[in-house]
Amino acid sequence: MTRAMGAALRRIQIGSVLSAFGVGFTVPFLYVYVAQVRGLGASTAGIVLAAFAVAALVVLPFTGHALDRRGPLPVLVGAALIASAGALALGLARGEVAVIVAAAVLGAGTAVMQPALATLIVWCADTNTRTRAFATQFFLQNLGLGIGGLIGGQIVDEHRPASFTLLFSIEAVMFLVLAAIAATVRMPQSPALRGSVPRDEASAGRNGLRALLRHRAMVQLCVLGFVLFFACYGQFESGLSAYGVEAAGISASTLGIALAANTAVIVVAQFAVLRFVERRRRSRVIASVGLLWALAWAVAGYAGLGHGSQAMATAAFVSTYALFGLGEAMLSPTLAPLVADLAPTGMVGQYNSAFALVKQLALAVGPAVGGPMGAALHAPYIVTFLLFSLGITVLALRLGRRLAPGQDQPSLARARVVAQGGAPAEPVPSGA
């Protein structure tokens, strides 16, 4: 990595953590704000939460082409400005329609920011530093979310609507800060940044969806990603929370402790886990996450059995979230770099957007399926998602057979090249 690339990457990471800090101010309190503070009821709060997912599903199919054609910097600036407007409007909105529209605007902006930031990291980090760069971003974002949530919890007062307006205003300002930082980033000059793309890959960029669907390794990774996000992230604030309350008798305050444990494990373990991940095949790391999450679901099942003391059930439930956090720390330096290494030159933005779209689909479907099951069908819920976790392991091992050595284990491929007296090369995307 050159000095210019390092400087640009540091500025992007600073902007990313500040925006996460702003999001942390509002995310834990969104339901309370809509349903109780604005007095719009639980059904409207549910529609508002759905508006985030719907907005993301609408904008992400168009985001990839814009990223590859215009570059990630202007797309990120525009997305941050839109998100800022949405956050401020949400904090000032009073009626049902105004709240839903503001949530959709905020959701659209934040959805586009994700692949834009990922593409910027790919541009600023070479294959030697990409894994660590994505791990650092995940660590900083979780740290920002956690600190923002803690400070927001001290400010918020459900009897004072102005306190919620303040929270959304802080979030809006943080998005403006991200836009300002992104606008001042000076990207290093390289062939990829100047648009020097081989003719066949430039043609692929114009027919991005068709080329992506022909790329079997990427399609398999998208299927795997859907199962990952469906079986974990899509359950945190829906099915798993409902299961904890209804089956394990967990209090609302304990749910907060469980989420805090999840974040704490990510923050504490991220770089220790990174050293483990960097030396191993990505497909096997993902496969081990499936086994780890199967264990997490088994522990959650124990929490809901009703045997033993309530303290043991609480400890088991908090441990479930902690185990999920350990798996997330293993995935953060694995999934995003793998998407980047699979992408042909000129299509990094489209691949990042496609994977972000898969994530949003899983986050939309996950609560719809898991929520009712976690609340009423306790044993089938645990068994179903334990099997999904084991499915992650199977899908990851199948994906590994389709990856090139430089994609599955870049460190080993680089070591072989250096041992032969050559220079490390960029991984070659696998074909259909």
Image (tube, grey):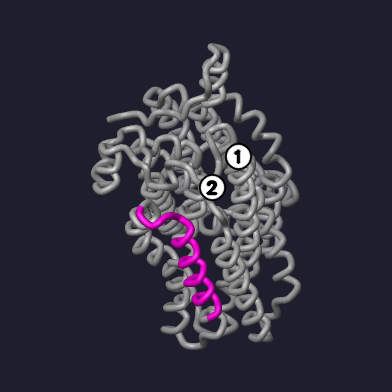
Q: Is residue 394 magenta-colored? A: no
Above or below, comparing residue 274 to residue 134 in the picture? above
Position in image of residue 285 (x %, y %): 54, 30
Q: Estimate the x, y position of residue 5 in percent, counting from the top left.
A: 58, 45
Which of the numbered marks, if any, corresponds to residue 138?
A: none
What's the residue at 47%, 74% (across, down)? 103
Residue 9 visible in the displayed image: yes
Q: Is residue 369 visible?
A: no
- The residue carrying mark 1 is 2
**Do callouts 1 and 2 mark residues in contact (Cβ within 8 Å)?**
yes
Crowd rating for badge 2 (residues with CA inside 10 Å; few <14, some 14–19, many 20+): some
Q: Which residues are magenta?
A: 69-88
Disc marking residue 188: 2
Residue in the image at 65% along x and 62% along y: 18
**Label 1 sits on what residue type?**
Thr
Q: Which residue is rendered at x = 58% and y = 78% of the image?
A: 33
